[in-house]
Image: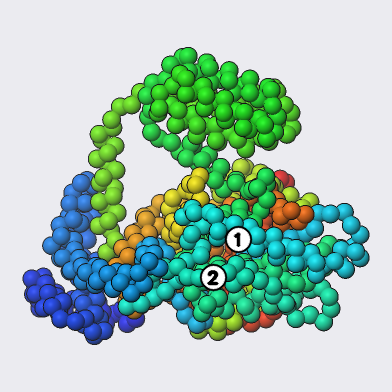
Amino acid sequence: MWFDLQNRSSWINFANETFSRESVRNIQDHLFKSTASTFFPSQIGLLCGILIAVLVNVKTNKQLQKQLLKLKNINELSLIRISICALVILPLFLAFLLIFLIYRSFVRIILQIKFRGKFRGFLSANDTVWTVEHQKWKSVINILALLEEKRSENFESSLKSSEENAREILEMIRSKFEVLMRSDRSEAAQKIFYCLNRELGYSFWTTAECKIEDYVKFIDIPSSSSFLTTTLVKKWLGEVSNDFLPRNHSFLWEILVCTKPIIENGSIKYPIICRVHHSLGDGVALLRFFLETIADQEKKPSSVALEALRKEYRNNEARVGARSEACNKVCNEACSEACNKACNKDCIEACNNACNAACNKTCNAACKKVCNLACSACIEACSEACNKACNATCKKVCNEVCKACNRAASEPFIPNIRGCINSALKWINLITSIPFYVVQHLSSEPDRSCLHGLNLSGSKRFSWLYESNDSHLLLQLRKLKRTLPAVRLSDLILAALSGSLYRHYERTKTAIPQFIQIVVPARIEPPTKELKLENKFSVAIQKLPILPPLCRNSNFHDLTERVKVVKEETDRVRSRPDYLINYAIMTIFGYLLPYQVLSRTFDSKLATMVFSNLPGPTEEATLKNYKITNLSFSVPHRDSTGIGLTLLTYSGRMQFSLYVDTALIPADDDAQRILQDLENELRLYVEISGS
């Protein structure tokens, strides 16, 4: 989230004049007099102006900056920041928020009386941020899934029965969500059937009478023949992607099943469009929920949850109680014996059960927790090993995991007082940095290019590019990044995007900027094993240098230097507290501020585009006789940021989606050319490196 302020120089002059004439005490007196009466827009503007004046004066006070720079002790620096906030900023800021807290409490009472049993509470703070919408950009995520029939029938008979197949898909999806509506009482299952409302400035959930037919329905894309083309689907999806959701945008999702299939490369694929309001959850949670709901039970793609467990295990810094030799021995033996007896799916279950049983008998509670994480982390690796060779290979994999578990549990628990103090100081430093961070964003300049700065039209264009099954590009890129020092897959993608955008600027004969700013979302908390529909992510702005693309005469050194430039910007953003600060701002303001104030607080006027990297299932999901072969995922636009690029890794392949406003890219083919140039650049990287 970013704050935009026009006429910054006049505000800075106002700040300096204010502090030269008035003391902090006079400002506080003026504030409390203002808050004694009703807040009109002019008063809110004056209050915000005074608050910004305080922040700007602190930021531009050279004498104070020199004093801060001389300090090397983090304790003293934190103490000074705390003093500044306590004496000047916090009283003003807290008084400002206290008014809305009291008002919010009264609104809750009124809504509970009015809606009685239908009232389900306010939206969470991070969900509320996505209720800020405009006619030209709505907070709706569009997911396109292509289903291909698995039955071995000839092409003509499959085409003749396409209408029956579409009806079959519709009924299967309806039946699965019908079960959720009638019997599943989990928090996620209840939330998807809530209605989104807004009264007295705050958004809240209510229950409503609804039928599954209101959510899952047929859609007939106009076509002169009995089948569709990719071009027709892209054009139609761009037209409806910014439409209202059912019941005047109060329903949170809808699934549209096309009555006609796409004929492409001799295969018949049935398009399914899932449109979801972002207030329901973030991309990771929504993708996981809808895939696990639609997909068959025995083939549920749970790799996202497993990856979270693996990450939790690898990053586990906790020290658990000392573990006995008996526990080490029995855990190793039980896990090895289980894998010797069973393969594939049975091995996964047997290994997990055996390890849990071993820990239940001989380990303490802390050790049991670590060992369970280890076994969960082992599941996917164990499965892959068993698919290739049973017994010895799988035994080796599981033994290695158990050894890692032993090492994690071997050190006794020693309270780290110094670490606790340092951690507390870091959080204090983070919180007190928020005002300075806000001022920094107020002084930032927005991008100026043909891809940013124009008013969005509200008309959208949806393009996608899927990696073919036999190209193995994702696998080759993963090999390539291992040859480069500490490089991430996203660094390679952004480096290739830089060259692709350079070609676009050249092709459109417009000025080529030195760099653009991109919004990069990141999850604050890893996904839990139990699915929760929530927005647990934050954003930061990263600079992307626009560099000429590489050519076939380029060497590995050229590739390394190019990726290094992009990686430096990525590391710079990751080393700063931008994600945590933005998350704190969204949490506080999203909870307290009414819609009228919130809509003027959060905006996106600095960045050209959003880049989202989503980890998808490692296996193809299936729906009875159909397999989901491809997925496309769009991220919503906001304010003047009208381009969104999504990379979704699905079934070992990359799925790129580009969602643009036609005011920025009016030509039909230009969006697709950007994706094609991106893929060509990545293939050139692989060719140069010899991966």
Q: Position of residue 604 (x, y in %)?
A: 44, 72
Q: Mark 2 vs mark 1: which is more N-terminal?
A: 1
Q: Position of residue 219 (x, y in %)?
A: 69, 75
In the visual, does 149 lie left or right of 409?
right
Q: Secondary structure at mark 2?
A: loop
Along the line of sight, which residue is nearer the eye, 424 or 238? 238
User: Residue 37 appears in which quarter of the rendering?
Assistant: bottom left
Q: Amino acid at mark 1?
A: Glu
Q: Secondary structure at mark 1?
A: helix
Q: Position of residue 68 (x, y in %)?
A: 21, 56
The answer, for residue 521, to whether it is visible in the render is: no
In the visual, does 269 lie left or right of 79?
right
Question: Disc 2, disc 1: CB below 8 Å?
Answer: no
Q: Position of residue 576 (x, y in %)?
A: 38, 54
Q: Which residue is label 2 attached to?
A: 210
**Residue ID at (83%, 62%):** 267
The answer, for residue 342, to whether it is visible in the render is: yes
Mark 1 surroundings: few (<14), some (14-19) or many (≥20) residues within 10 A: some
Give the spatial CA distance, label 2 vs label 1. Answer: 11 Å
In the visual, does 100 lie left or right of 574?
left
**Residue ID at (11%, 72%):** 28
Mark count: 2
Label annotation for residue 436: none
Along the line of sight, which residue is nearer the eye, 340 or 317? 340
In the visual, does 615 lie left or right of 75?
right
Q: Amino acid at mark 2?
A: Cys
Name the quarter where the C terminus is drawn.
Answer: top right
Q: Which residue is label 1 attached to?
A: 178
